[in-house]
Image (cartoon, grey):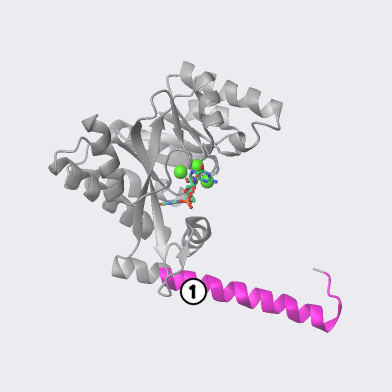
Amino acid sequence: AKVRGKNQYQFYTEDLMQAARRRMRLENGLRAALVQNDFDLVFQPIVDLKTGLVQGAEALLRLELDNGEAVSPDEFIPIAEQTGLISEISKWMCEKVFRTLSDWSRQGISVPDITINLSGRDIQGDFASVHLAALARQHGVNPDNVTLELTEGVLMDNQSAALETLSDLRKLGFGIAIDDFGSGFSSLAYMRMYPITTIKIDRSFLQNMDKDAADIIILQAIIDLSNRLGLRVICEGVETPEQATRLAEYGCSYGQGFYYHRPMHPTDFISLITAQNKN
Ligand code: C2E
Ligand code: CA
Ligand code: CA
Ligand code: CA
């Protein structure tokens, strides 16, 4: 950065210090949440676009700081990745989800399809294939009900390690989803390279649907291609009834977004499912 005199320089260091303090606060918050088992798990329903019925959900992590501030995972996941805390957090999340699923089946609730976000580090070591398999066994969870979401960026790095882990996971029965599909590069190659079962189309496509004709063509092509390859297609960020209708017209099977449901606590999610099954 250009240095324009002493005052500007001071502003700059103050910003840096503030950012560093924020980081430290979040890092401490993450460590505390791990020690105190104090993260929250929420579910955002995934809906059948034809019927509007809930078909599954994405598990999302929530962190609340000791002053009550709710921090978005968009802010704390990168810090968890940089500090290496992410491995512990992923373990926490998977264990929490599996425990919840086994509670549900013990209550006689038929378990909907659940997706869990994993980070790059999770599929580079043996965490995924060794730990996840053991956890599923321990909680009596059928991996067929669980899909693991990975972003394109993660699939781009360290491809041979990723391929080995994902193949192992797929053999165990877990589904594999490409998250934020279409927001990065080389997406089409990944559809073939890895044992993918689900495509989650990035919500930027819906945001541009009214403005950008090219985006609509690409969106339709992605849906068409995924359908032909026999992949499950979920479009993210559905916020209006118009978007839902158009997606269904394009042949997209599933949607997720604020128009249908916001992320909710597990008990609310189960009420929703049970009410739906009664009808
Ligand atoms: P993501 O995987 O793309 O998750 C979807 C995000 O979009 C969620 O934000 C969700 O609340 C938000 N969203 C859902 N519907 C709509 C909509 O209609 N409009 C808009 N504008 N947004 C919508 P959230 O929960 O804040 O998560 C942000 C990101 O944090 C996630 O993006 C994911 O990359 C990451 N994340 C969340 N939980 C975990 C986790 O357990 N592990 C890892 N590694 N990452 C996680
Ligand atoms: Ca996701
Ligand atoms: Ca996504
Ligand atoms: Ca995202």
Residue most extreme to the top = 228
- Where is mark 1, residue-wise? 25
Label 1 element class = helix
Q: Residue at x 83, y 70 (%)?
A: 2
Instruction: State the image coordinates of residue 240 (x, y, percent, origin top left).
Output: 54, 35
Q: Residue at x 17, y 42 (%)?
A: 140
Q: Considering only vertical position in the picture, is 53 above or below 71?
A: above
Q: Is residue 35 left or right of residue 222?
A: left
Q: Considering only vertical position in the picture, is 120 above or below 273?
A: below
Asked whether residue 265 appears in the rendered view, the answer is yes
Instruction: State the image coordinates of residue 83 (x, y, percent, origin top left).
Output: 47, 65
Type of amino acid at the residue the image marks with label 1: Arg
Q: Main secondary structure of the magenta part?
A: helix
**Magenta stretch containing residue 55, yes or no?**
no
Q: Residue at x 42, y 41 (%)?
A: 149
Image quadrant occupied by the N terminus: bottom right
Q: Considering only vertical position in the picture, is 109 above or below 83?
A: above
Residue most extreme to the bottom = 6
Instruction: State the image coordinates of residue 154 (x, y, percent, origin top left).
Output: 51, 44
Q: Which residues are magenta?
A: 2-29
The image quadrant of residue 141 is top left
Image quadrant occupied by the C terminus: top left
**Magenta stretch containing residue 24, yes or no?**
yes
Residue most extreme to the right = 4
